[in-house]
Image (cartoon, coloured by chain):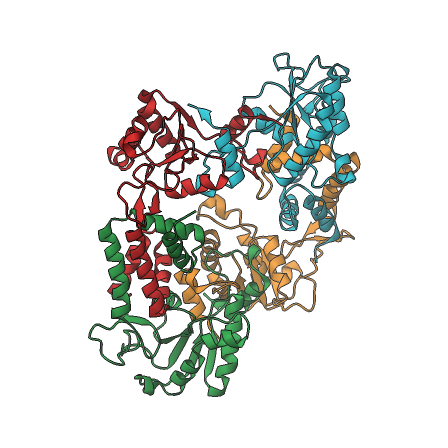
Chain colours: A orange, B green, C red, D cyan
Amino acid sequence: MLPLSLQKLINIFSKFPTIGRRTATRFVFYLLRLPNSEIKELLAAILELKQKIKICPFCFYPFENQDNQENKLCGICQNAGREKNVLCVVEKETDLESLEKTKKYKGLYFILGGTVASLKKQDLEKLRLNELIARIKNPAEFGIAADFKEIILAMDLTTEGEATNLYLERSLKFLGKKITRLGRGLPIGGELEYADEETLSSALEGRKEI
Amino acid sequence: MLPLSLQKLINIFSKFPTIGRRTATRFVFYLLRLPNSEIKELLAAILELKQKIKICPFCFYPFENQDNQENKLCGICQNAGREKNVLCVVEKETDLESLEKTKKYKGLYFILGGTVASLKKQDLEKLRLNELIARIKNPAEFGIAADFKEIILAMDLTTEGEATNLYLERSLKFLGKKITRLGRGLPIGGELEYADEETLSSALEGRKEI
Amino acid sequence: MLPLSLQKLINIFSKFPTIGRRTATRFVFYLLRLPNSEIKELLAAILELKQKIKICPFCFYPFENQDNQENKLCGICQNAGREKNVLCVVEKETDLESLEKTKKYKGLYFILGGTVASLKKQDLEKLRLNELIARIKNPAEFGIAADFKEIILAMDLTTEGEATNLYLERSLKFLGKKITRLGRGLPIGGELEYADEETLSSALEGRKEI
Amino acid sequence: MLPLSLQKLINIFSKFPTIGRRTATRFVFYLLRLPNSEIKELLAAILELKQKIKICPFCFYPFENQDNQENKLCGICQNAGREKNVLCVVEKETDLESLEKTKKYKGLYFILGGTVASLKKQDLEKLRLNELIARIKNPAEFGIAADFKEIILAMDLTTEGEATNLYLERSLKFLGKKITRLGRGLPIGGELEYADEETLSSALEGRKEI
């Protein structure tokens, strides 16, 4: 039977994304073996994170706001070089990171904060839908001189992502903007023999001249 | 040590696609347990296959040519309802099957018979490139009243498929036809977090209005 | 829609061990591409298998009986050097092969011909239980001067294997022989952290001096 | 480009067992979304861990030493019901946990603190070998009235585990105690067809009467 103070920390680590009890237990034993100096570093880094990092008032992306200035925008939002007519809605911060790495997208982002598995009220309330509508309608209010012509719904192609896409599409329709979704098709490395019919149909429809 | 007649058959089965020695060995023991009637059925089915099945003179797809008529075309090629202005080049027969299952493609096919890992002469000779060029230039010679405006290169997005695409593109360019490839993008079930940058770039570029 | 003669062969290959329809289809297209000489080789090898290979009257292992002599035993059974006091019962031919490769077992074998998922009558009838009992009781009747002191039940440690072990144990008990099963424990490469409790218990109980 | 304070924490989480940069990044975004109250809980739990948890002076297992008494032993070591003549050497804390779950082992433990990939000096120095020898020779010095007749080396059956076993065996030989290792064999769910020859040999040698 593990001591209570270990169990408490195992419970906390078990809630970390992708972590089960087995790995959470290994984390705790790892921390026990760490010298005190490294424990201090970890604690300091977590505190610093919460102190230095602010959430961008427009897109909800976390960034370092060193001068602690009110209503300061994140690096992408305040970048004059970004296109101000297209807004890409992503589920979570790491999806924004993934899209930035492609260096193909030059517009702005909005982090929705989740997906909906079903269309239950408590699921829907977790999404920043009202915040999204407000930013599309009146970006100036949030410090950005933009006029969005296109809203890209960049959700995963999972069941949850597709349900969220559908829900967003219905909820944003009244704004009269062009709404797009990511192109479907064969991924790099994909083989026709193992592709599902929907993916292959999309790959055929979306064929490109070379 | 397995008897020679077993080993001989294991060697033959080991050359079947996706089969290693372990599975080939299981095949042989499976055949040994089969009653003679089922062995006869297997032998008859293989013989019948080679006797009844002909290769379509236009697209190289195997089909049952029961009246054994000379130069008869396969079902797709002789179907008056198929579009006669687009030709889809696939690597192998099962890729044609996969595309047919989508029910989205209405044109004709051509089975190339392989891919090229490198651009070595012996690899290139395995492909039906001259046959492809002849059918694009003069389909009537092979029994089809077609006039191809677009050639779709429907290769896998693997290294071999991409190399073959490139080789075909260069080899077909002089014909002056529109050449297209399958659309790249996120497959059904795909997540942004695990997609490579090229796939994500394609998904962004190929985004569609909803 | 694939031609009937292709479908017939696909159906036959789909019954081969570990093969589904997708791979069976690839087999058929592979055969279609094979030159006639190699098709002939395949057919001849299957025929030869059924003609040359006989089943050992004692252990049911297939072997090449070239002089076609009645009641001839397989190589292992007629090997004077094999121990005649221990009999190892295996499910299938490849399990015998696996045990022979270890070069640790010097006794005789018996191929049971299957496992039982449940204890249903139709499942139990597939096993060569009566044949096994007859060979343990009176090996001389089957051409072997043996006197078995130990019967090893070398089943897989799967649910089916364990159920078969249990069934065999009960069915052979009345013979009054020592009945053993394979030792359980950590396999090579195994880690304590990922081992189930039963495997770990067995590894602890079966610990060996070094 | 992620802010420095995020990167610092990502670097720290990347050193956690089994965690790569991708998951470490998700951890950081997860922390950013956590309410302050839960961050405080996490920090408090880590601090509490380091304050309350002591390392057992005999076996090196971490335990809660609430009255902060000098040289207090862990629950297992001070349990009068445990057998005092057998010592089980494990690599790490979670291996001890795994063995305890089997409820089959009633002796004492010793946590070695690592394995050796090679027999390099810097690797060997990480192991608590001198500590182990001292505890076997004179357990009373560490608060336990024991007289070990058997030392179980319960290492993983990986290359590292086997090398460590070998090194321990050589290093402990001079003590004149019986040294054992975990039993090898087929694990639950294991199949003869996929077992390596060494595992099968062990399973044969370690067969048990039923």
Residue at the far left: name it: B67
Residue B80 point in image, percent of width and height:
27, 79
Left or right of residue C3: residue C91: right
Residue D30 point in image, percent of width and height:
62, 45
Task: Quadrant for residue B119, please give it.
Answer: bottom right
Q: Is residue C26 visible?
A: yes
Left or right of residue C71: residue A105: right
Q: Is residue A177 visible?
A: no
Count of picture labels: 0
Q: Name the foreground residue: D178 vs A76.
A: D178
Residue D81 point in image, percent of width and height:
61, 12
Q: Is residue D95 above or below residue B92?
A: above
Q: Name the foreground residue: C73 vs D126.
A: C73
Q: Is residue A159 above or below residue D152?
A: below
Residue B3 point in image, percent of width and height:
38, 50
Q: Is residue A134 above or below residue D207?
A: below
Task: Quadrant for residue C170, please give it.
Answer: top left
Left or right of residue D109: residue A153: left
Location of the C terminus of chain B (image quadrant): bottom left
Q: Name the foreground residue: D114 vs A120.
A: D114
Q: Is residue A63 above or below residue A101?
A: above
Task: Quadrant for residue C162, please give it.
Answer: top left
